[in-house]
Image (cartoon, rainbow, N blue to C red):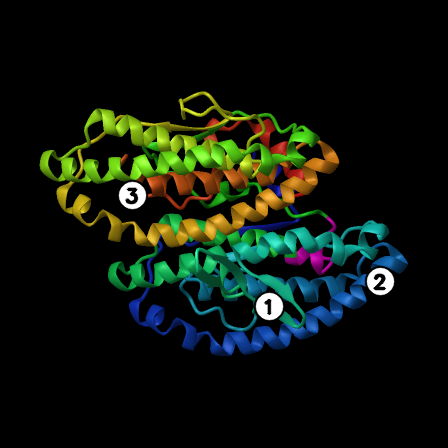
Amino acid sequence: MAASRAERPIRLVVRDSDLARRRLTVFFRLILAIPVFVWLLVWGVAAFVVAFVLWLGILINGEPPESLHAFVAGYLRYWSHASAYVFLAADPWPGFRGSTDYPVDLEIDPPTRQSRWKTVFRLFLALPAILLASTLGGAPGEGGWQFGSYHSQGHGSEWRVWSGVGGVAAVCAFLTWFYALVRRRAPRGLRDLVAYSLSYTAQATGYLLLLTDRYPSADPAQAEGYAELPEHPVRITVDDPLERSRLTVFFRLLLAIPHLIWLLLWSIGAFFAAVVAWFAALVTGSVPSSLHRFLAAFVRYGTHVYAYVLLVGGRFPGFVGREGSYGIDLQIEPRERQRRWATFFRFFLAIPAFFVSSALSGALFVVGFLTWWYALVTGRAPDGLRNLGAVCLRYGAQTNAYLLLVTPRYPSGSPLLEHAAAKPATDLTALGEPY
C-alpha cells in the first residue's frame, strides 16, 4: 500500500507526532501569521503568473521547464506550511523559505511530460476538484488563495463557512484553538482531518497550476501515512459495488421521496424516545435495551437514506434500518453504561461535534453532486468520492448516536475509512482514477 500511495505525484507528509501546542502562540496565531499571509500573497501572485508560462511551455514542448516547475512547487509547499500553521495542524512558525523539514510538508515529484489536450482545458477540468477543495480546505483563486464563501440556507436560518480560511479545515482549527488552550495539545482526530483536507487541496492546486496532470484523488486511504482510526462503538462498513444505474441516478431524488417522508416521521418518534432515554440514563446509568435498539435502528436507517440520496450507495434501501441490509451500513455495539454528568449535559457536549458534522455535510453534498454527473457518464461512482462520502456519513452517524444516547463515545474525526491492516492492497489501485 505504501508503494501505491507513493504513486501520487503530490503527497502530504506529517511529522508532528506529539501534537503539543504552546498556549501563547495558539492564542495569537492569526496575528503571528500576518507576515506569512503577506509573503504567501506575494509569492502566490508570482506563482500564478509563472503557471501561465508553464501552460504555454507544455503546449509547445509537452513538458514544463524544470526551473518554472520548481518555483511553483516551492509556492505550493510553502502554502502547505502556512496553512498547517494557521489551522493548528503544526506548531512551529513556518518562516519564509518553505524548507522541507517542516512538520507538515509536501513532497512533489519532478516535472514529467503532460498531455497537451488536458493542458488546454486544464481550468475547466479542474473545476470539480476546486469545488470539492473549497469545502475541505479552500479554493485557489487569482493571485493566491481566494476568500469566498460557502452558503447554505434553510428554515429561515443561514450559515457561512469561509473558503480559503474555511471549510472543514477551518471548523476543525476553530475547535482545536479552544482545545489547545485548555489541554496544550491538538486533538488527534481533528489534526488528521485538517491534514487530509490540506492534502486534497494541495493536489487540486497542483493540478490547476500544472505541476502534474494526475487528477486529484479524494480517497481517504491516502491519509494512512499519518492518520489513525480509533476503535468506536459506531462503525461504518462499505460493501457496495461502484456500478450505478444511470436511470436510477438521474431520478435519485424522486425515488428517495418515500424514504425522506418516512425518515421525517421516524425522527419525531426518535425525539421522544431520546427524551425518555435521557431520563432513564440519569436514573439508572444506562439506556433501556428496547430504546437503544429503536434509536440505533433510526441512526442506521438515516445513514442508509443519506447514502442512497447522495449516491454513496447504489441500491434502494429498506425501511427498517436493519443491520446488514444495505451496502453502506452501520455496526452499532450493544448499550453501555453512561456517566450521569455527561448524560445531563449531552446536548451541550455535542455542539462541537455538530460543527464538524455540518462542515462534513457540505463536503458530502459536493460528493453527491459530483458523483451524480460522473455516474451519468460512466455508469459507476468514483472510488475516492464514494469512500470520502462514507467517512462523512460515519461522522454524522457517530454524532447522532452520541446525541441520542446510543453511545457515550464521542465522534472520531479520523479521515480514514477503515484500519490500514484491514484493507487489501489491491483496493488502492483506484487511486489512479479521477477524484
Question: What amino acid is labelled 3 in the image?
Answer: Leu
Q: Position of residue 358 (x, y in %)?
A: 43, 52
Asked whether, in this view, residue 18 is left or right of residue 155, the answer is left
Q: Position of residue 43 (x, y in %)?
A: 63, 73
Q: Which residues are magenta?
A: 205-213
Instruction: In the rendered view, tell whether residue 222 sits above or below residue 34.
Output: above
Residue with the mark numbered 2:
57
- Asked which quadrant contains residue 143, the reply is bottom right
Q: CA distance from mark 1 to mark 2?
A: 24 Å
Question: What amino acid is labelled 1 in the image?
Answer: Trp
In the rendered image, residue 210 lying in the magenta stretch gets the answer yes
Residue with the mark numbered 3:
403
Q: Position of residue 87 (x, y in %)?
A: 44, 62
Q: CA distance from mark 1 to mark 3?
A: 36 Å
Tag in front: 1 or 2: 1
Instruction: In the rendered view, tell whether residue 146 sits above or below residue 315.
Output: below
Q: Measuring 54% from the left and 65% from the top, which residue is drawn there?
A: 149
Label 1: few (<14), some (14–19) or many (≥20) C-alpha neighbours in 10 Å = many
Q: Measuring 62% from the left and 29% from the top, which residue is drawn there?
A: 242
Q: Position of residue 356 (x, y in %)?
A: 40, 52
Q: Is residue 323 visible?
A: yes
